[in-house]
C-alpha cells in the first residue's frame, strides 16, 4: 500500500486539473448541448502561451497574460465557429467543434515545429519540491485541490447569486424560453465560454507545472478524460464534473501504480461506456423525457 | 422522355469508364512508386471509408466516431492473414514467430496456382477483416445504439480508443505483434486494381442506399419517431446500418494496410476518424459522389499539389512562411470555411447523375 | 354482429405523481368512426401514445381484434406510488410492451398532432417508405435487386394511393413544399400505405380553416367507405366531430366523463360544463 501513496497523491493533483477542464465542458454542454471538442486544445494553447511568455517575461506579467489570452481564445472560437451555427442541426455544430480542434492542433504544429515545448521557466513556489507523508513531490500537488475547491465554490456562488449566473441557469434549462424572456443569450453564452476558458487556463498552468512539457497532443487526452468526468458526474452538473474528475485522476494513477500503464487511458473509456450504458444521465444528472 | 432519363446515366457511366481506363494507363506508364499512382490508391481507400461513414452518419443520422477502430480491426486482419510464412519469424521477432503460421495468399496459391491464388487469398483476407469488424460492430452496437446522438459519438469514440489500446497490449503479441509494426505482407496491385475493388464495394453501398432499406435509413434520420410509427423497427435498422458501415470500414482498413505496407495500432488514432468525417462533411452529407470526389481532391491536394507549401517554394514563390506544417494549417482553414459557409458541402445530397440531369420545367407538367 | 377492433380496459398512465390517463376503458367496433374529445391536457394524446406503444401504460390492457397487445400492472416503485384504480386486475398476467413498429405491423397506423413527414423525401417516397414494413425481402435481396417484382408492385400501390387522396400531381415534390392541408393528407396516405385495419388520427384538422375542415370531413368519410376502415380520432373541431363520429368518448383530467352518440354528448351536462359550453342566445 505504501508503494501506491505517491500515485494516489499524484492522482489527487491531476484530478483537480481535470476538474478545472471538466467544468468548462459541462457548462458549455449544459447551455448549448454541444460537446466542445476544441476545449482540450484551448487547454493546450494555454500551456503553450505559458511556455513562451514565462520564458521572456516576468512571472507577474506572464500569468495574467496566459489567463487573458486564453479567455480571448475561447471567446473568439465561440463567436466565429459556434455562433453562426446556432440554428443548425446538432451534428453541424459538433463537426465545427471538431474542425476547430483540428485547426488549433495544426496551427500549433506549424508554429512549434511539432516538437514538445519544455517549460523552461516554471512558476516559482508551486514547482518547488516538498515532502508530504514521507513522499517527495512538487508543491503544486497540494495547491491544486485547494485552488480547485476555491474556484468551484466561487463559481457556484457566481451562478447562484448573480444576474448573469441566473441567466446561465435559465438558458441551460430551456434555451427558447430564455430567449423569449429577453435574456441576452449572446452575453450568457460568451460568459460561459469565458469562465470555461479561464478555468482551463488555470488548470493548464497547474498541469504543466506537474508535467513540464507541452506537446501538440497534450490537450487531447486530458480533454477527453475531463469530458468523461463531466459525463460521469452528470453533464450539466458542476459538482458532478468535479467528483468525476477526481475519481478518474486517482484511478488512472493507481492503475499505473499497479503496473498496467497501457490501460490507464483505456480505463477512462471503459468507465465512460459503463456510465453511458447503465446510467447515461450520470451521477447527479437529470432525466429528460421527450414529448411525442 | 426515355432517352432523356437515360442521358445522365450514360454520361455518368462514361465518366466512370474513363477513370478506369485512366488507371490502367497510369499503371502501364508509370513505376508503382510514382506519386500519381500512390495518390490514386490512397484516394480510393479514403473514398471507401468516407462512403462507409457517410452511410452511417449521413444517410442514417447515427453520429458515430468509431471509424478508426473498425479500420484498425480490418487492417490487422489483413496483415495477420497475409504475411508470408517465411517472413513471420522476422516480423514477430519478439514473439517467437507469432501464433499464425500460414498466409492466405500462399494457401490459395496451392489450389489455384501462382497468379490467381495470391489475389484470391488477399481478397479473402479483406473480406474476413470486414466480417470480423461487422461482428465487433454488432457487439458494440448492442449497448451503444440506444444512446442519443452526442452520447453515441463519445461512446463509439471510446470503443475505438479501447480497441487501439487493446491491440498494443503485449499479452496478445503472438497474434498482433504488440506495439511493434506488422509488415512484409503483399499488396494486391496497382491503381487499376484499387479502382476496381473500391468501385465494386462503393457500388454495393450505392445499391443499398437506393433500395427500400436505404430509404428506411433516411426516414430514421429525418424523423425516427415517424419511422417507428410506420413499422420500421429502429433497433434492427440502426444495427443493420452500423454493421454494414463497419464491414466496409473494416475492408477499407484492410486496403489501407495494403497501401501503407506497414500496420501499427498507434496510427489509428481518433484524428483519423475526424479526418474522414471532415471529408464526408465537405463532400456533402448524404452524397456518395461527394464523398468520393472530396476524397480524391483531399488526397491529391494534400499529397501532391501542396507539398510545396511545406518546403519553402510554392507556385514559384519562395518564402520562410512555407515551412513544415503550413500545408496542414491551410487545409484546416479551408475545412473550417467549408464547415461554416458551405454547410451542404460540394454536392449537398446530390449524386453524379444529378449534375447532368436537365432541369425540370416548373408547373404545367403532365401527370 | 359487430367485431370489436380495439378495446381498452382500465388503462392508466401515471408520470411520477401525475395521473395523465385515469382508468380509461373504451371499445371501437368494426367500421365505426369514434372520436376522443376533451379539453387541452385532458390526456387524449397520452392515451393515443399508450395504444400505439410510445408509452408503456402504468396499468391496464389494450386488445386489438380480440388479442391483448399491451398490458401492464404497477410494479416496483410504482406499486406504492400508484394512485389509480384496479391495481390488481392484471397483476397475475404477463407484461406486454411492444415497440410502436410491432403495433403498426398488427394493423394500427397513426398520424401525429404535429405533422411528422420525412423532410428530405418526396411525396411519393414518403408513402413508399411506409410500405417497407410489408416487404418480404431482406437486406441482401433488396440490395442486389432480387425483389424487383415486389418493389414494382409496391410502387403501383403507392401511385394508386396518391391518386385516391388527390396528390398524384405533386408526387415528385419534396414533402415539405406542400401546403399544410395537403401535408396532412399526405400523412394520412402514408398511414394508409401500411394497410391498417384501424386508422388513428391525432387532431387531423388542427390549424385548418372551416372550408379545409369540411373537405377533411368528406375525406375521412370517403376513406371509411373506400378502405372499409375503422377510425379513431382525437379532435377539437366540434363540427368535424359531430358530423362524422358514430360515437364519442369525452375525457377530462384523464378520466372518462361521458360516452355516447353525438346527440347524447351534446346534451350531456357534464360535457357541457367541462368542455363544450352552451350556445349563447342571440
Image (cartoon, coloured by chain):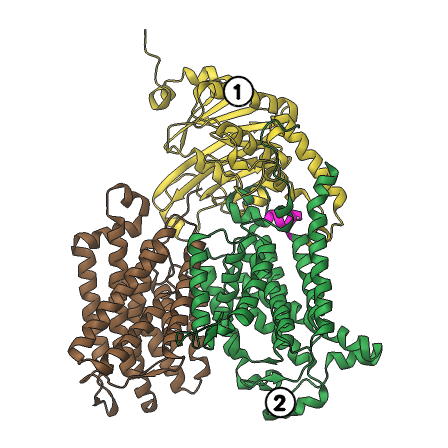
Residue at left offset 40%, top offset 61% = A97
Give the secondary structure at mark 2.
loop
**In the rendered structure, the residue with mark 1 lies on which chain?**
C
Hue used for the chain lettered B: green
**In the rendered structure, the residue with mark 2 lies on which chain?**
B
Within-10-Å neighbours for mark 2: few <14, some 14–19, many 20+: many
Residue A249 vertical position relative to residue B283 in the rendered view, above or below? below
Q: Quadrant of the C terminus of chain C?
A: top left
Q: CA distance from mark 1 to mark 2?
A: 77 Å
Hue used for the chain lettered C: yellow
Residue assigned mark 1: C215
- Can residue A205 be spotted in the picture? yes
Residue B92 numbered tag: 2
Q: Position of residue A157 (x, y in %)?
A: 17, 60
- Can residue B138 be spotted in the picture? no
- State which quadrant residue B100 falls in: bottom right
Residue C174 vertical position relative to residue B181 in the rendered view, above or below? above
Amino acid at each position: 500500500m505504501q508503494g501506491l501513496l505517491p500515485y494516489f497523491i499524484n492522482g489527487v493533483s491531476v484530478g483537480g486539473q481535470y476538474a478545472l477542464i471538466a467544468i468548462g465542458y459541462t457548462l458549455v454542454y449544459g447551455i448549448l448541448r454541444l460537446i466542445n471538442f476544441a476545449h482540450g486544445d484551448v487547454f493546450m494553447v494555454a500551456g503553450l502561451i505559458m511556455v513562451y511568455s514565462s520564458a521572456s517575461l516576468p512571472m507577474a506579467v506572464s500569468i495574467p497574460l496566459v489567463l487573458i489570452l486564453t479567455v480571448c481564445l475561447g471567446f473568439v472560437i465561440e463567436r466565429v465557429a459556434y455562433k453562426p451555427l446556432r440554428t443548425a442541426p446538432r451534428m453541424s455544430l459538433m463537426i465545427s467543434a471538431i474542425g476547430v480542434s483540428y485547426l488549433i492542433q495544426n496551427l500549433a504544429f506549424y508554429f512549434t515545429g511539432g516538437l514538445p515545448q519544455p517549460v523552461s521557466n516554471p512558476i516559482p513556489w508551486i514547482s518547488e519540491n516538498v515532502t508530504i507523508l514521507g513522499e517527495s513531490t512538487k508543491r503544486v500537488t497540494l495547491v491544486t485541490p485547494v485552488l480547485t475547491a476555491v474556484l468551484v465554490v466561487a463559481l457556484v456562488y457566481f451562478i447562484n447569486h448573480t444576474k448573469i449566473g441566473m441567466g446561465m441557469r435559465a438558458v441551460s434549462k430551456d434555451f427558447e424560453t430564455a430567449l423569449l424572456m429577453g435574456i441576452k443569450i449572446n452575453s450568457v453564452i460568451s460568459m460561459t465560454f469565458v469562465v470555461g476558458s479561464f478555468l482551463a487556463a488555470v488548470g493548464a498552468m497547474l498541469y504543466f507545472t506537474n508535467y513540464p512539457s507541452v506537446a501538440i497532443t497534450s490537450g487531447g487526452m486530458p480533454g477527453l478524460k475531463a469530458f468523461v468526468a463531466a459525463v460521469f458526474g452528470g453533464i450539466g452538473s458542476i459538482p458532478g464534473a468535479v467528483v468525476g474528475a477526481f475519481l478518474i485522476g486517482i484511478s488512472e494513477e493507481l492503475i499505473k501504480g499497479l503496473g498496467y500503464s497501457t490501460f490507464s487511458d483505456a480505463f477512462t473509456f471503459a468507465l465512460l461506456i459503463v456510465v453511458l450504458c447503465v446510467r447515461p444521465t450520470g451521477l447527479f444528472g437529470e432525466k429528460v423525457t421527450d414529448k411525442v | 422522355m426515355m432517352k432523356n432519363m437515360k442521358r445522365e446515366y450514360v454520361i455518368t457511366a462514361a465518366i466512370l469508364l474513363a477513370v478506369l481506363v485512366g488507371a490502367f494507363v497510369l499503371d502501364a506508364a508509370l513505376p508503382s512508386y510514382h506519386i500519381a499512382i500512390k495518390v490514386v490508391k490512397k484516394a480510393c481507400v479514403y473514398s471507401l471509408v468516407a462512403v462507409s461513414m457517410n452511410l452511417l452518419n449521413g444517410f442514417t443520422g447515427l453520429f458515430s466516431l468509431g471509424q478508426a477502430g473498425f479500420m484498425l480491426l480490418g487492417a490487422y486482419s489483413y496483415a495477420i492473414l497475409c504475411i508470408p510464412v517465411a517472413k513471420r519469424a522476422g516480423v514477430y521477432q519478439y514473439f517467437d514467430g507469432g501464433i499464425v503460421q500460414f498466409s492466405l495468399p500462399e494457401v490459395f496459391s496451392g489450389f489455384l496456382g501462382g497468379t490467381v491464388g495470391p489475389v484470391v487469398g488477399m481478397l479473402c483476407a479483406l473480406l474476413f477483416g470486414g466480417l470480423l469488424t461487422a461482428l465487433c460492430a454488432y457487439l458494440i452496437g448492442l449497448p451503444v445504439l440506444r444512446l442519443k446522438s452526442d452520447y453515441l459519438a463519445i461512446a463509439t469514440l471510446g470503443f475505438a480508443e479501447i480497441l487501439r489500446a487493446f491491440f498494443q497490449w503485449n499479452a496478445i503479441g503472438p497474434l498482433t505483434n504488440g506495439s511493434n509494426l506488422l509488415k512484409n505482407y503483399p499488396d494486391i496491385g496497382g491503381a487499376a486494381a484499387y479502382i476496381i475493388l473500391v468501385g465494386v464495394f462503393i457500388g454495393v453501398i450505392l445499391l443499398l442506399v437506393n433500395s427500400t432499406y436505404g430509404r428506411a435509413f433516411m426516414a430514421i434520420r429525418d424523423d425516427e419517431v415517424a419511422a417507428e410509427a410506420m413499422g420500421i423497427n429502429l433497433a434492427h435498422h440502426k444495427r443493420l446500418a452500423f454493421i454494414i458501415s463497419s464491414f466496409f470500414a473494416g475492408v477499407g482498413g484492410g486496403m489501407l494496410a495494403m497501401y501503407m505496407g506497414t500496420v501499427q495500432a498507434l496510427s489509428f488514432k481518433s484524428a483519423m476518424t475526424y479526418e474522414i468525417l471532415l471529408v464526408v462533411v465537405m463532400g456533402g452529407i448524404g452524397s456518395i459522389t461527394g464523398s468520393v470526389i472530396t476524397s480524391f481532391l483531399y488526397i491529391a491536394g494534400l499529397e501532391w499539389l501542396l507539398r510545396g507549401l511545406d518546403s519553402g517554394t510554392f507556385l514559384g514563390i519562395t518564402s520562410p512562411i512555407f515551412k513544415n506544417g503550413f500545408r496542414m494549417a491551410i487545409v484546416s482553414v479551408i475545412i473550417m470555411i467549408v464547415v461554416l459557409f458551405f454547410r451542404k458541402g460540394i454536392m449537398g445530397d446530390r449524386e453524379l447523375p444529378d449534375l447532368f440531369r436537365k432541369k425540370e420545367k416548373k408547373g404545367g407538367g403532365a401527370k | 354482429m359487430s367485431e370489436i377492433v380495439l378495446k381498452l380496459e382500465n388503462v392508466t398512465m401515471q408520470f411520477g405523481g401525475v395521473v395523465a390517463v385515469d382508468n380509461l376503458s373504451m371499445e371501437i367496433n368494426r367500421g365505426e368512426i369514434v372520436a376522443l374529445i376533451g379539453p387541452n391536457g385532458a390526456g387524449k394524446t397520452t392515451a393515443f401514445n399508450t395504444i400505439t406503444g410510445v408509452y408503456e401504460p402504468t396499468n391496464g390492457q389494450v386488445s386489438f381484434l380480440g388479442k391483448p397487445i399491451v398490458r401492464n400492472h404497477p410494479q416496483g416503485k410504482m406499486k406504492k406510488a400508484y394512485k389509480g384504480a384496479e391495481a390488481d386486475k392484471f397483476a397475475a398476467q404477463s407484461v406486454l410492451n411492444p415497440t410502436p413498429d410491432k403495433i403498426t405491423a398488427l394493423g394500427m397506423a397513426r398520424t401525429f398532432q404535429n405533422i411528422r413527414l420525412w423532410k428530405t423525401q418526396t411525396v411519393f417516397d414518403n408513402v413508399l417508405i411506409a410500405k417497407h414494413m410489408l416487404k418480404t425481402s431482406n437486406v441482401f435481396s433488396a440490395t442486389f435487386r432480387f425483389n424487383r417484382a415486389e418493389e414494382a408492385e409496391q410502387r403501383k400501390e403507392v401511385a394508386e394511393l396518391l391518386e385516391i387522396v388527390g396528390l398524384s400531381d405533386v408526387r415528385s415534390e419534396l414533402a415539405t413544399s406542400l401546403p399544410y392541408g395537403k401535408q396532412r393528407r399526405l400523412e394520412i396516405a402514408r398511414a394508409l400505405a401500411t394497410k391498417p385495419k384501424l386508422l388513428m388520427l391525432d387532431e387531423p384538422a388542427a390549424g385548418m380553416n372551416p372550408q379545409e375542415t369540411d373537405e377533411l370531413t368528406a375525406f375521412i368519410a370517403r376513406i371509411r367507405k373506400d378502405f372499409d376502415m375503422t377510425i379513431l380520432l382525437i379532435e377539437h373541431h366540434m363540427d368535424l366531430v359531430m358530423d362524422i363520429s358514430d360515437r364519442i368518448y369525452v375525457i377530462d383530467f384523464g378520466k372518462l366523463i361521458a360516452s355516447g352518440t353525438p346527440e347524447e354528448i351534446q346534451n350531456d351536462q357534464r360535457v357541457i360544463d367541462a368542455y363544450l359550453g352552451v350556445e349563447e342566445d342571440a
